[in-house]
């Protein structure tokens, strides 16, 4: 026998845990990250999915310090009851517990606060520490109690406490209760058919221990919810839900209602934005199928975790399985989806794993192609809403091999830290090949014409002049601008005659409080690049505008071509904020930032500053880093403008773009050989590790070579 059900029949098992004494003590707490929790709304209670599997089995939901900080904040009004401490002051020891089928090993330790117990047991048994905190509050109000009792610690999680008899002394004590409860939920998960309440079917669940109160037919959608009913076998009736924070009628029971309410109040919606049936433990609720998809859910030891997994096959390549979630997203919002895949022994099968952002202002997707073998392998895809806002997310699997079997298990979808977009902003007529559509008068009218000739890109360019200083041409682009994102605008300019033409490139963010970045330039008789980079600080911005001001009067004429607008992951790629974000990789390498007045002509490409570096070291280098969640298969491109700082000298080196992370680093590189003319260098990288956490742009130099100027760096 491997079960000890709670609140049902009293089944005695041999005690495996020691009773642990509680000793008072005060612990220092750290700050818990802000929660999205808000007061529970009874209309949202779903008896078939009280909490999602993804939330329930997330053993990393809280660290030990976060859990303890939370307990301290909720127990702020508690004072020790004589020798009996508040939960926030509790100090216990853990016994040495060998690894078993349900939990990994726990070592003997002393001096553990309650937060550490919840985090340690949660990690060992694969249960969310937030769930365990909710459980002890639901059972004993132990987190918020102003004066706890000894009884509350002895029976903290209500484990082995049937409704019809006293609790079993075999599991008495705070640590024993937490461990036994967590372990029990894994037993429910691994042997779902051995218990009364099972996912993927309709279950008749009593309202109350009094059978005369009747039952409710509940289709249980997932294993975590089934486990809660196995632990506390009652569903709340209408009276209990009508008075969510109070009592109902004589047939009301409150255990699962209170679990849902407490979790919602403290940690947020226990199922919002989470997938239904992600582990297929007895159910496929929420998943739909397009095309001809043969599917079967297995409940056996072949699962990656738990007991369930799904087998998909198709005669038609491109058929799919998908699930949509109502999750509003804004530009910059990021999500990561994961899945474990395998196929039959001796075979391979291919597929595509996709996250879609749908609805709102349009659709966009992140796609990962994979090959499954006979060994469970995790596949990861990262999605950032780069161009549009959305009303929903969709996880989709496309079957790319006909008549083969694809097994899926443990599908997850998690919100990630917001990430700046890295998409090119589409401009109309950027090279004027089809005229000047999209380009209008900015600050008053001027003369303009599209000309065929020796363009910088293609065969056409824009020619413009003015009789009034400060007139401009501009293009306004509606765009879901993300706050704290950087954008770089680049144009190519030259003058029609030998005389110089002065002007200014501006990039605006519009909507709410407008902001602008500018670069002044003097165009000569050859095409030269001009860039400007703007970091958006206004959340209300809805438009970007590229504008070129003219400060030389007709008949002098300015030629413009090859305009681009690119989201930039480097907020200080143009050195306008000094050397912020840039560093040297070896101590003897020199690096400084100059204003345009300090370097002469040609001046900076982007803004009014540029960087300069040299080194006496072989392979001395400078670098700029970007912290970002990466995924294997993603492609990134870095560009930088370089020129030698010494007349008649050629700078030689190597430009590299690195991915950095705990599972290894890799890089792509390009050779550099540049004279005194600004030249754009590009390097592209395909990410190898889904655990990579940052990108690095690095410029290696030849020892004792000439000074090199750098400016206008972009990573996208």
Image (cartoon, rainbow, N blue to C red):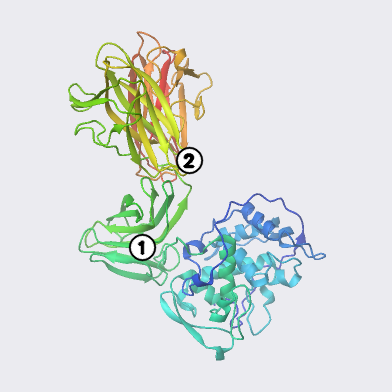
Q: Which of marks 1 and 2 is in front?
A: 2
Label 1 neighbour load within 10 Å: few <14, some 14-19, many 20+? some
Task: Name the quadrant of the N terminus.
Answer: bottom right
Position of 634 relative to 40 (above/below): above
Image quadrant of residue 422? top left
Residue 472, x across and y down, in percent: 33, 27
Q: Which of 70 and 377 is in front in this view?
A: 70
**Residue position for label 2:** 538
**Residue position for label 1:** 323
Label 1: which secondary element: strand
Q: Which residue is drawn at 68% across and 81% down?
A: 166
Direction from residue 257 to residue 317 in the image, left or right: left
Residue 83, x across and y down, in percent: 81, 64
Compute the Cα span from label 1 to label 2.
34 Å
Residue 382, x across and y down, in percent: 39, 49
Label 2 neighbour load within 10 Å: few <14, some 14-19, many 20+? some
């Amino acid at each position: 026998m491997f079960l000890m059900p709670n609140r049902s029949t009293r089944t005695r098992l041999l005690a495996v845990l020691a009773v642990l004494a509680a000793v008072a003590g005060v612990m220092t707490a750290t700050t818990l990250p802000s929660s999205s929790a808000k007061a529970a709304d009874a209309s949202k209670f779903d008896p078939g999915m009280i909490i999602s599997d993804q939330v329930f089995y997330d053993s990393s939901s809280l660290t030990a310090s976060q859990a303890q900080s939370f307990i301290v904040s909720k127990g702020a009004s508690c004072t020790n009851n004589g020798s009996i401490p508040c939960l926030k002051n509790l100090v216990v020891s853990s016994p040495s517990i060998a690894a078993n089928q349900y939990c990994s090993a726990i070592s003997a330790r002393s001096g553990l606060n309650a937060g550490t117990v919840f985090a340690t047991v949660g990690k060992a048994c694969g249960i969310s520490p937030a769930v365990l905190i909710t459980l002890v509050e639901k059972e004993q109000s132990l987190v918020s109690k102003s004066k706890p009792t000894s009884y509350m610690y002895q029976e903290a999680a209500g484990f082995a406490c049937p409704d019809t008899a006293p609790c079993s002394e075999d599991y008495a004590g705070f640590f024993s209760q937490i461990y036994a409860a967590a372990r029990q939920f894994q037993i429910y998960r691994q042997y779902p058919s051995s218990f009364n309440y099972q996912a993927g079917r309709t279950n008749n669940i009593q309202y109350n221990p009094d059978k005369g109160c009747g039952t409710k037919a509940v289709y249980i959608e997932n294993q975590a919810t089934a486990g809660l009913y196995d632990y506390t076998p009652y569903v709340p009736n209408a009276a209990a839900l009508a008075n969510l924070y109070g009592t109902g009628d004589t047939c009301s029971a409150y255990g699962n209602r209170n679990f849902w309410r407490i979790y919602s109040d403290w940690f947020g919606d226990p199922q919002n934005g989470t997938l239904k049936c992600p582990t297929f433990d007895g159910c496929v609720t929420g998943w739909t199928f397009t095309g001809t998809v043969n599917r079967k859910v297995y409940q056996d030891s072949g699962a990656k975790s738990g007991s369930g997994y799904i087998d998909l096959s198709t005669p038609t390549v491109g058929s799919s399985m998908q699930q949509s979630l109502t999750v509003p997203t804004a530009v910059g919002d990021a999500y990561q989806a994961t899945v474990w895949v395998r196929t039959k022994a001796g075979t391979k099968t291919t597929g595509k794993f996709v996250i879609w952002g749908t609805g709102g202002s349009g659709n966009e997707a992140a796609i990962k192609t994979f090959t499954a073998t006979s060994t469970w392998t995790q596949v990861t895809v990262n999605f950032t809403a780069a161009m549009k806002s959305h009303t929903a997310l969709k996880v989709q699997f496309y079957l790319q091999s006909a008549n083969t079997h694809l097994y899926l298990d443990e599908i997850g979808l998690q919100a990630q830290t917001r990430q700046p977009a890295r998409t090119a902003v589409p401009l109309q007529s950027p090279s004027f090949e089809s005229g000047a559509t999209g380009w209008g008068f900015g600050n008053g009218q001027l003369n303009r014409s599209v000309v065929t000739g020796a363009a910088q890109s293609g065969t056409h360019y824009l020619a413009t002049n003015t009789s009034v200083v400060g007139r401009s041409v501009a293009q306004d682009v509606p765009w879901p601008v993300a706050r704290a994102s950087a954008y770089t605008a680049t144009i190519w300019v030259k003058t029609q005659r030998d005389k110089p033409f002065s002007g200014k490139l501006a990039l605006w963010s519009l909507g709410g409080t407008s902001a602008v970045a500018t670069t002044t330039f003097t165009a000569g008789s050859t095409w030269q690049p001009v860039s400007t980079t703007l970091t958006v600080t206004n959340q209300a911005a809805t438009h970007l505008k590229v504008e070129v001001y003219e400060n030389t009067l007709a008949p002098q004429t300015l030629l413009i071509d090859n305009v681009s607008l690119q989201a930039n992951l480097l907020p200080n790629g143009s050195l306008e904020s000094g050397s912020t974000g840039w560093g040297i990789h070896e101590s003897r390498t020199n690096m400084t930032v100059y204003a345009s007045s300090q370097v002469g002509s040609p001046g900076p490409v982007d803004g009014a500053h540029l960087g300069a570096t040299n080194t006496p070291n072989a392979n001395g280098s400078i670098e700029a880093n970007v912290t970002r969640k990466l995924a294997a298969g993603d492609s990134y491109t870095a560009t930088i403008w370089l020129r030698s700082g010494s007349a008649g000298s050629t700078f030689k080196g190597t430009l590299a773009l690195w991915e950095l992370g705990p599972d290894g680093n890799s890089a792509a590189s390009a050779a550099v050989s540049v004279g005194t003319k600004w030249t754009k260098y590009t390097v592209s990288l395909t990410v190898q590790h889904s655990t990579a956490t940052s990108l690095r742009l690095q410029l290696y130099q030849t020892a004792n070579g000439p000074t090199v100027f750098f400016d206008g760096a972009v990573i996208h």
